[in-house]
Amino acid sequence: MKKNIMEYFVPWLEGIKMYISPHIELAWKNPSLHRMMSNENPLEPSEKVLEAINKYARMGNRYADQGTVVRSKIAEINGLDGPENVMLGNGSSEVYDMIWRSLIVPNQGEEIIQHTPCFGIYKLRAGIVGAKLVSVPMKYEDRQLKFDADAILEAITPKTKIIVIANPNNPTGNFMDHEDFIRIAETGIPFVIDEAYVEFAGLGKSKIGMIANYPNVIITRTLSKAYGLAGLRFGYLLSNKDVVAKISATLIPWNVSTVTMWAALAAFEDTEGLKKRVDFINSQVKYIEESLSDIEGLTIFHSNGNYILFDAKGTGKKGNDVVAYAEKNGIILRPQPEMYGSDGFFRITIGTEEENKMAVKIIREFLTS
């Protein structure tokens, strides 16, 4: 008897739908709204990057190479041996997909441990490869969200195949202690450290030095944040060369375009452009945090990224209501799910100087009304 077409699909896709970001869709549909919700960089690409885009767009009729030049540059910046320590991806989201596919046997109960709240892509790609996701919550105490390495280690089972930690964490903006990274790395389990925002605090906060002693450590980064190239889709992985070779076997040929690779190289070489973006974001994080610090009952989580997490429960207001009020007044902020017994969480992405002043005014207006 002929089967229904749906019966041919792998069972772990059941219930999983295409990822759609409603706040990004809203921003594109209504350009009058200010985009302060997706951790984008408010500064457009530098002239050097735009020149590279224009130059290599004219070579759009040619296939890209394997990116040896830009991979060599990344290795040089990070003190690694060479391009064999670097893998490129279509944004770091694709990099996670390739790591997960390389390590997970689908639908066998194999586990990925994540520390929550965290970046939603870990969960999304775990479902696609048929992994079991184990979410270990951070500790919320003394009005701070803290890493809980003990809980992560306790969550390990014989089925654990991957542990992933964002450093600094999204959305909490804080770093985990170095000693805890060592404790987790010592397990030998593939340990993915997401450094999407590390440039805002400087590469001195990176765990890149662990790669030499721990072949199970895999570091991921992106040009979407500090470099301000979210729309170009460029991410990369740093690890032991044998690990890189294994994961690279999953690469879709020409997954990163010629234009994107050379634009990325221009961005890496434009150190003044990076400093300009980092200095601006850090100054605006300080401005927003200081400007709202006197609102009674508002918890502000100091951020090392280009975003700030708030908990408004102490003001008697709900996070979703803050976000709704902001949208009515022209700004898209990011809602957060209820957690740790509080419905007051919301997040703001650093915008332009004008946008940040607007956001401070609107948030203050609503929380103190």
Image (tube, helix red, strand yellow):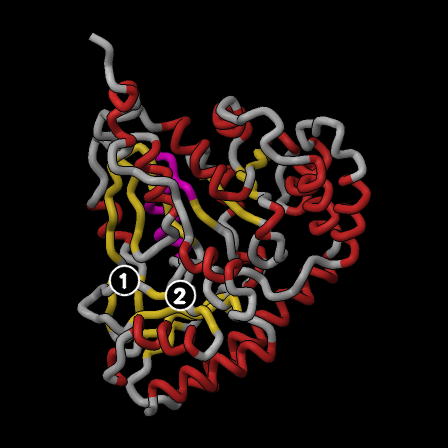
Callout 1 amino acid = Pro
Q: Is residue 48 magenta?
A: no
Is 311 in front, or is 321? Answer: 321
Q: Quadrant of residue 139?
A: bottom left
**Is residue 181 in the magenta section?**
yes
Q: Which residue is mark 2?
A: 334
Query: Which amino acid, by three-letter code, is at mark 2?
Result: Arg
Q: Is residue 71 left or right of residue 313?
A: right
Please say if the residues under marks 1 and 2 sit with CB atoms less than 8 Å apart.
no
Image coordinates for residue 73, horizontal then vertical, percent: 70, 41
Q: Nearer the viewer, residue 111 or 355?
A: 355
Residue at the spot 33% in from the left edge and 46% down from the top edge:
183
Residue farthest to the top, as pictured: 1
- Residue 251 location, x and y as percent? 53, 26
Circle 2 packing at 10 Å, graded few (<14), some (14-19), many (20+), is many
Q: What is the magenta range?
A: 177-192
Residue 98, percent across and down?
45, 31
* Residue at (54, 39) in percent of width and height: 238
For the residue pair 364 and 295, the one nearer the viewer reads as: 364
- Residue 311 is left or right of residue 330, and the answer is left
Q: Quadrant of the C terminus?
A: bottom left
Mark 1 residue element: loop
Seen at 51% across and 59% down, the residue is 29
The residue carrying mark 1 is 337
Q: Secondary structure at mark 2?
A: strand
Q: Position of residue 99 (x, y in %)?
A: 43, 33
